[in-house]
Amino acid sequence: MQDNIYFGDCRTLIKNIQNETIDLILSDIPYGISFENWDILHDNTNSALLGSSPAQEKIGNVFKSRGKPLNGWAESDKKIPLEYYNWVLSWAPDWYRVLKPAASVFVFAGRRLAHRCIAAFEDCGFIYKDMIGWNKMKAAHRAQHISCVYQRRGDDISAKKWENWKLGNLRPVFEPILWFMKPYKIGGTLADNVLTYSLGAYNEKVLRKYNQESNNLFNIVAQKTDTGLHPTQKPLSLMSLLIELTTLENQVVLDPFAGSGTTLIAALNLNRHYLGFENNEQYYNIARKRLETELKSLNNSLFSCDNLSVI
Ligand SMILES: C[S@@+](CC[C@H](N)C(=O)[O-])C[C@H]1O[C@@H](n2cnc3c(N)ncnc32)[C@H](O)[C@@H]1O
């Protein structure tokens, strides 16, 4: 399989990829925070995870199934992080298998469960290199003024005392991008690996191309064209930066949780081979259409959905 998006469960589809054939995995995996149905990675149906508040109904589909923990955290809620770790472990060994030595993995993981993802990757043998901060520059914020709650209760004394205090988190303006590396072969150095596999180094010049400082904080604002196809769509320029940072033209980029296909579009535009999996039919169709449109505009007459080659 090559240069296409495939419909289905990535945990099954990846079995078709041969060992040590992929140069980069770049994936925005489900964060396990019940953002949408595809993001619920546990069997917990207790009261804390059912229903939705009027505020949640108002904003639409997102976070609906998380409900409100009105009864406090139940025992089964406490197991969610461990279940997320086990879910990552259900596919990460295959990522390790298909990657070439010293190939990079960039994983977008939510702040709340990223540590479980890191532990699972380490337990599969990956080297955890770094956490890149993606500074989105702006983000929606829904922390509640606690004084409003007391005011509604008619408790003016508490409302006055707790003025300026909020319930919830600070504005979530950054997202972690976890950077892992498959270990290089024993007996050689990383510099040797670069010569053999063209993998293991990063291209500093690329950071300047994307107007970034030479550090691990990327300031990238989503453009209008980066929205509307998927509820967690990532900026094309961010995916492009990560691809160019660690790979050369004609190398192979895999995104097992492709969504609307942003990684694949970036890879295509940068003359890399690309391979994506998506098990939600709606997003799969969007990604496919996006790729077709992009290919047409690149005037690539070779594209054919039935014309699949095997790595
Ligand atoms: C965070 S989104 C990716 C969004 C993407 N970065 C974009 O720009 O559109 C993760 C995607 O993984 C898909 N997904 C979840 N579990 C999957 C599985 N087992 N196999 C394939 N796709 C899966 C979901 O349907 C969702 O579209």
Image (spheres, rainbow, N blue to C red):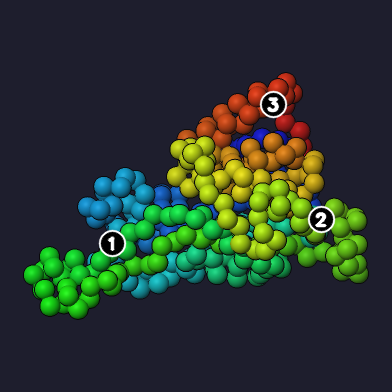
Which residue is denoted by mark 1 in the rendering? 68
In this orientation, does residue 182 appear? yes
Q: Earlier in the sequence, mark 2 or mark 3?
A: 2
Quadrant for the N terminus, please: top right
Quadrant for the C terminus, please: top right
Secondary element at image label 2: loop
The numbered disc on residue 298 is 3
| Location of residue 99 with respect to 84 vertically, above or below | above
Q: Quadrant of residue 45?
A: bottom left
Instruction: Tell me which residue sits at (61%, 49%) in the image.
Output: 238
2 and 3 marks in contact (CB < 8 Å) = no
User: How many labels were placed on the picture?
Assistant: 3
Where residue 186 appears, as percent x and y from the top left, is: 87, 69
- Crowding around mark 3 (Cα neighbors within 10 Å: few <14, some 14 to 19, many 20+) is few
Q: Which marked residue is nearer to the observer: mark 3 or mark 1? A: 3
Instruction: Tell me which residue sits at (40%, 66%) in the image.
Output: 170
| Location of residue 56 with respect to 224 vertically, above or below | below
3 and 1 marks in contact (CB < 8 Å) = no
Q: Report, in whole angstroms, how far the alpha carbon at label 3 lies from the one at label 1.
A: 47 Å
Q: Report, in whole angstroms, how far the alpha carbon at label 2 lies from the one at label 3.
A: 27 Å
As drawn, is 61 to the left or to the right of 199? left
Which residue is denoted by mark 2 in the rendering? 199
Where residue 258 appears, as percent x and y from the top left, is: 58, 44
- Crowding around mark 1 (Cα neighbors within 10 Å: few <14, some 14 to 19, many 20+) is some
Which amino acid lies under the numbered mark 1 shown in the image of this protein? Lys
The numbered disc on residue 228 is none
Which amino acid lies under the numbered mark 2 shown in the image of this protein? Leu
